[in-house]
Amino acid sequence: MIKNTKRTVTAISLLLLLLPFLLLLSSYADSFDAGRIFDAILSFRLTGAGAASVQEWIDGDLSARAGSGGEWAVIALAQTDEGKKYDFSAYRASLVKYLNENNVASASSRQKFALTLCAVGGQSEPFVQKTMNDSIGELGIMSYVFGLHLINNGLTSEKHTAASVTAQLLALQHGDGGWSVMGDYGDVDVTAMVLSALAPQMERAETEEAIGKGLSFLSARQQDDGAYMSYGAKNCNSCAQVLTALSDLGVDPNDARFVKNGKTVTDGIMQFALSDGSFAYKEDGVYNNMATEQVFYATVAAKRAAEGKSPLFVLDEVSAGQPEPTPTPTPETTPAETPTALPTPETPEPTAVPTPETAEPTPVPQTPTVPSSPSKDTEKKNSSGGFYLIPFLVVLAFAAVPVVLQIRKRRNRR
């Protein structure tokens, strides 16, 4: 009887000692869900490209397609922990060649390419500064969004500043708290992308207020299964944009405002996951390139937030330790205009401009009652998740050890 009691007490003692560490491991496992999704998509991409490594993918398939697809994947790779280890020189040269040989008509497309060049160490390319001077505000709200992303990285414009572009975006906010490309009511995708661009400017009082309204809009638009709709259709891309925005703002996806029936936006995203690691746009099980691409960079944004790093599009110094690349000279001859600079159906630009896949005649107005948005400090506290519980459990477990030892000593005396 005494031996059995000793064994029981010993087992309880060990369990109490291990409990905090088991909980800690469990928390780490949860926080690395984004990492596992990222790895699954990466494996899918490498297999599709016939590449044995990420570097081979960069030098091969991505470089071959520079300018016609894959830019968001390149930015995502550059913003990972391994980003500084990759050599993007071949890709950078291919993209510059494409830009020198093609006239990119779309302002937001030029900004996307400029942002990509900055991510791979090409910020000194003439194309980047030219884009800063001739694109911001030239194609509606999205050219302000991507223009602000570039300004957030320290680039300057002859016509615009961070304050002026931020003010313009705030002026475009609708009464429901959202933003859209057109109309008087907010769209989920555009709202999420605006919030991502505003994240580095949230120290401004007026920006913080606008961000709070935008978050309330996204909270109200979330579906009961955690997913999101845009232009009348529940889809993966909208979920990915919201996860990116929440991550950039330091808002935990488990924040009470973004949990519906116990489901979060991450649950919403996983509804579109396919067995090979890719993602569908709709719940039809059909692979979609853009959905896969957007989830890919959303997972990077989520990982960066968990690690306390900057928002996704506030770019790391990926060229650190490498010599500054010499700008590629622009050919003297005037390049012919080609339609290839515009997004194709296979690789559309990730904006919320209606496409045949997502459009509906007119968004239906919604004016739901939503909870008030907490301050930035509250959001940061919410983003810490269950880790506040860990120190308490550790202390509790070690405090229990003397009690357990005392019980054992009394049992031995008997």
Image (cartoon, rainbow, N blue to C red):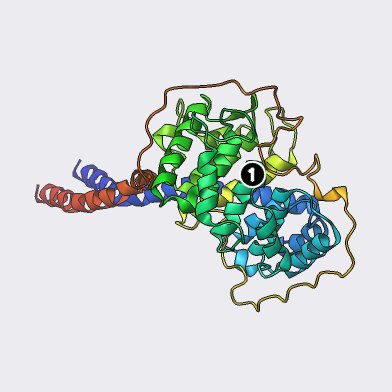
Asked whether residue 297 appears in the rendered view, the answer is no
In the image, residue 143 sits, relative to residue 269, either above or below, namely below
Instruction: Characterize the local packing of mark 1: few (<14), some (14-19) or many (20 or more) Cα atoms within 10 angstroms.
Output: many
Front-lying residue, 386 or 26: 386
In the image, residue 156 sits, relative to residue 305, either above or below, namely below
Q: Position of residue 213 (x, y in %)?
A: 44, 35
- Is 33 displayed left or right of 216 in the figure? right
Q: Quadrant of the N terminus?
A: top left
Front-lying residue, 142 or 60: 142
Quarter of image, res 286:
top right
Quarter of image, res 356:
top right
Front-lying residue, 384 or 203: 203
Q: How many marks?
A: 1
- The residue labelled by disc 1 is 142
- Is 97 displayed left or right of 291 in the figure? right
- Is 117 displayed left or right of 328 in the figure? left
Q: Residue furthest bottom?
A: 323
Q: Position of residue 2 (x, y in %)?
A: 18, 44
Q: Position of residue 16 (x, y in %)?
A: 28, 48
Q: Position of residue 140 (x, y in %)?
A: 65, 42
- Residue under the image location 90 percent in, 57 percent down: 336
In the image, residue 284 sits, relative to residue 94, either above or below, namely above
Q: Secondary structure at mark 1?
A: helix
Looking at the rendered structure, the kind of residue marked 1 is Met
Asked whether residue 156 appears in the rendered view, the answer is yes
